[in-house]
């Protein structure tokens, strides 16, 4: 089989597509014939050794994928050969076959394609956890979303709208903002323009926004925090810009603003039942046609290195999916 291999933590152009043996399933594991794997920002970070999880090298990247069970290991009773599954595992997906622990799999709903299944859990479950469990978003509130055209950003637009909020989408160019608009954003702000914070104030007035969803960090974090009104909540999602912002804490004291960290992976381990409830809610919204997934591009396995490079240099938007032949 063919797979993307990260032999050592290094710049993305040192990744390679290699021929590897099809894995045999260990006890409690299954081997999946991968049909689709989506790109997430952490994939690019992990290959460079910049992510909080550093797997032993060599490893096959690809955090999230969907496919068909190809073989099952000893002791696996709830999946059988031929089952369609979603595998939000953390690695292994950029390959024609992948081995995964059976307990981490979910059945792929009949109405969901492999491409959609591969693009669903990380972005939407992270974002529902952030907006609902951490941020307690209420109908009628206004959310400013930084990086709104990206993977978690597009999910944030859709989920915030479903929860009855007004959405201000911030992104770096007109094409990205057009995608945000098509997903339901109420207001659009190009945050590469110097006066972008004044634009936010012009939209919401002096009361400020009630919530910031920040997947970007860098130079955008402080103006976004200043845009929050009294007791506004600032959700720290990620640092796609690279720089982890250093925030003057007087900005929290003034207006009693709340800075709230979001760590979806850990929250799943700590509250699996809450995670299951969220996934069921997301599945129901998907089945009702309320969560059209923003898949913007499909590439073959040979195109994955280039796609990862584009993702990590701000040249991508929505979800890119690798489809296996
Ligand atoms: N906390 C959690 O539990 C959790 C879970 C999932 C993901 N995350 C984090 O969320 C962040 C976004 O993930 P994602 O998969 O949505 O990524 P993505 O699809 O690549 O989106 C990231 C967005 O960040 C913006 N950006 C600004 N500066 C950038 C730069 N220098 N390089 C690349 N992008 C830049 C881009 O939009 P513009 O060009 O419009 O600025 C882009 O759309 C990552 O940091 C990821 O680790 C956190």
Image (tube, helix red, strand yellow):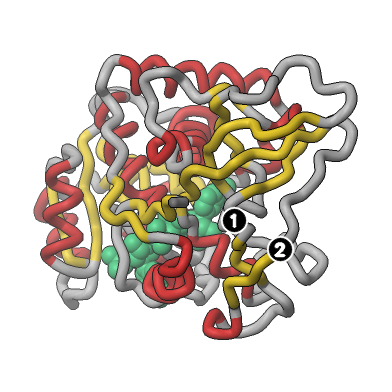
Name the residue nearer the viewer: 228 or 314.
314
**Residue 303 figure quarter:** bottom left
User: In what element is the residue under mark 1?
Assistant: loop
Q: Residue at x 58, y 72 (%)?
A: 17
Name the residue nearer the viewer: 56 or 210.
56
**Left or right position of 229 against 241:** left
**Residue 232 figure quarter:** top left
Q: Does 95 sit above or below residue 47?
A: above
Q: Does 119 sit above or below residue 173?
A: above
Q: Residue at x 56, y 44 (%)?
A: 34
Counting from the top left corner in percent of width and height, residue 46 is at 64, 67
According to the image, label 1 marks what residue?
A: 95
Counting from the top left corner in percent of width and height, residue 127 is at 45, 39
**Left or right position of 20 against 165:** right
Q: Does 243 sit above or below residue 123?
A: below
Q: Which part of the image, by quadrant, shows the N terminus?
A: bottom right
For marks 2 and 1, give the CA distance: 9 Å
Counting from the top left corner in percent of width and height, residue 260 is at 55, 46
According to the image, label 2 marks what residue?
A: 20
Label whose residue precedes the other's in the sequence (2 or 1): 2
- Residue neighbourhood size for the residue with mark 1, other residues' Cα within 10 Å, grouped as few (<14), some (14–19), many (≥20): many
Q: Residue at x 26, y 23 (%)?
A: 290
Q: Badges 2 and 1: C-beta atoms under 8 Å apart?
A: yes
User: In what element is the residue under mark 2?
Assistant: loop
Name the residue nearer the viewer: 201 or 312.
312
**Residue 8 figure quarter:** bottom right
**Left or right position of 85 against 53:** left
Q: Is residue 320 visible?
A: yes
Name the residue nearer the viewer: 183 or 191.
183
């Amino acid at each position: 089989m063919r797979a993307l291999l990260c032999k050592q933590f290094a710049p993305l152009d040192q990744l390679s597509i290699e021929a590897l043996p099809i894995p045999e399933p260990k006890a409690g594991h299954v081997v999946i014939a991968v049909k689709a794997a989506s790109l997430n920002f952490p994939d690019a970070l992990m290959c460079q050794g910049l992510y909080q999880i550093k797997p032993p090298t060599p490893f096959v990247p690809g955090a999230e994928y969907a496919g068909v069970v190809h073989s099952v290991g000893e002791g696996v009773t709830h999946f059988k050969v031929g089952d369609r599954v979603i595998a939000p595992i953390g690695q292994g997906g950029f390959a024609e076959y992948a081995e995964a622990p059976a307990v981490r799999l979910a059945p792929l709903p009949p109405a969901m394609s492999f491409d959609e299944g591969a693009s669903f859990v990380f972005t939407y479950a992270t974002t529902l956890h952030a907006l609902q469990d951490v941020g307690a978003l209420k109908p009628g509130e206004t959310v400013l979303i930084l990086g709104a055209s990206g993977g978690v950003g597009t999910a944030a637009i859709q989920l915030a709208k479903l929860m009855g909020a007004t959405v201000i989408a911030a992104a770096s160019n007109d094409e990205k903002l057009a995608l945000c608009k098509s997903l339901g954003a109420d207001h659009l702000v190009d945050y590469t323009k110097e006066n972008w914070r004044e634009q936010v104030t012009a939209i919401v007035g002096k009361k400020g926004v009630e919530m910031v969803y920040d997947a970007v960090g860098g130079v955008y974090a402080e103006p976004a925090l200043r845009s929050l009104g009294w007791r506004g909540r600032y959700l720290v999602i990620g640092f796609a810009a690279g720089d982890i912002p250093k925030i003057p804490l007087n900005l929290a004291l003034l207006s009693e603003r709340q800075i709230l960290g979001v760590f979806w992976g850990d929250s799943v381990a700590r509250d699996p039942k809450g995670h299951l409830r969220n996934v069921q809610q997301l599945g129901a919204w998907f089945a009702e046609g309320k969560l059209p997934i923003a898949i913007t591009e499909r590439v073959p396995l040979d195109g994955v290195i280039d796609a990862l490079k584009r993702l990590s240099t701000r040249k991508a938007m929505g979800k890119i999916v690798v489809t296996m032949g």
